[in-house]
Amino acid sequence: MQVRKAVIPAAGWGTRFLPVTRAYPKELLPLVNKPLIQIAVEEAVASGIEEVIIVVAAECSAIRNYFRPIPELGVLLEQRGDSSLAEEMRCLESLVRISYVSQCARLGLGHAVLSAREALGDEPFAVILPDDVVDSSESALSQMLRIFCDYGGSVLGVESIKTADIQRYGVIRPETVGARVHRVRSLIEKPSLDITPSQLGIVGRYILTPQIFDAIAAVGPGHGGEIQLTDALSILLETQPIYALEFYGRRFDVGSPLGWLEAQVAFGIRHSEYGDILRQKLRHMV
Ligand code: G1P
């Protein structure tokens, strides 16, 4: 079955990025000059997604405004002779059909996904967390869509996580069934090191069947008092298989200042306009 819709949760507090996130949603932080939310939407489009649902905090209008057409800006850029930038802005405004859902309270990732239930309907859908950016020739999501077609059942994007960081992730107990593909035997959200079932952590990409909604509705508050998607996946696992793919690509945790800085450098040194000069400047600095 085709996956046509993707949900992008963008309503968290962004506590790892305080203080900037007191007044500014972390999803609008830029990588070079492009905000994380746009990078996530572009990954969806590159993967063949036709409709994106962004879950925003009720009071946040900045993300809703970002993709809105600004006709007068196009006119201004054309008048200044910058047609290529004007065209880039038009493309951004018409990337894909985008709708917005307000998360009434910030009760965690599971709750954010459940908030989009009506908009997502009764079909499989993708989840993209914008604070995990993947640099790859084929998008992480399209690699996962192939696994969804081949195996059926939900698919999680995973990667081997450093021992010191394991407590920040949902972790799976894998049974390997193919090249980089695992059947998930159990999952746990943010395990301590002594009970972690493996080093394979979920990294911000999911393809889920609609049965996940009932599972989310059935779980109570989990780790950190939040409604955890990982806990709902454990319930789903009782009735449906779940697979995990170690996708190809380099993932950056841009939800933390260090990961964000690393990604700035990685994307910056390859940038068509700034790459060469940035490389030279970095050489001098280091
Ligand atoms: C969330 C999920 C976690 C996953 C992580 C990936 O955690 O709950 O299972 O491993 O995203 O980034 P959060 O980063 O919101 O604490």
Image (cartoon, rainbow, N blue to C red):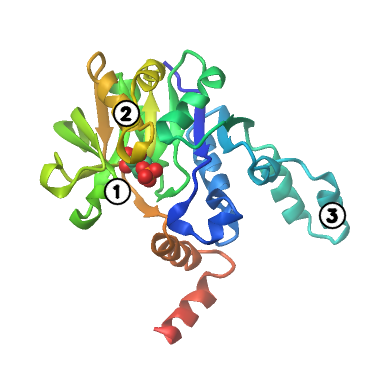
Residue 227 percent across, percent down from the top left:
38, 31
Using the image, determine if residue 277 lies above or below residue 160: below
Marks 3,1: beta carbons within 8 A: no
Q: CA distance from mark 3 to mark 1?
A: 47 Å
Marks 1,2: beta carbons within 8 A: no
Tell me which residue sits at (42%, 36%) in the image: 108
Q: Amino acid at mark 1?
A: Arg
Residue 165 percent across, percent down from the top left:
25, 54
Name the residue carrying label 2: 155
Q: CA distance from mark 1 to mark 2?
A: 20 Å
Q: Secondary structure at mark 1?
A: helix
Corner quadrant of residue 188: top left
Give the side of residue 102 with respect to residue 137, left or right.
Answer: right
Q: Which is nearer the N-term, disc 1 or disc 2?
A: 2
Q: Secondary structure at mark 2?
A: strand
Q: Which is nearer the N-term, disc 2 or disc 3?
A: 3
Callout count: 3
Q: Is residue 203 visible?
A: no
Circle number at residue 78 = 3
Q: Is residue 57 visible?
A: yes
- Quadrant location, the C terminus: bottom left
Tell me: is circle 1 under 8 Å from ligand 1. Answer: yes
Looking at the rendered image, the disc whose residue lies closer to the viewer, 3 or 1, is 1
Camera-side residue of 97 and 211: 211
Q: Are there few (<14), some (14-19), or many (20+) residues within 10 Å of tag 3? A: some
Tell me: is circle 3 under 8 Å from ligand 1. Answer: no
Q: CA distance from mark 2 to mark 3?
A: 44 Å
Name the residue carrying label 1: 168
Residue 213 percent across, percent down from the top left:
41, 19
Of the four image quadrants, the one with ligand 1 is: top left
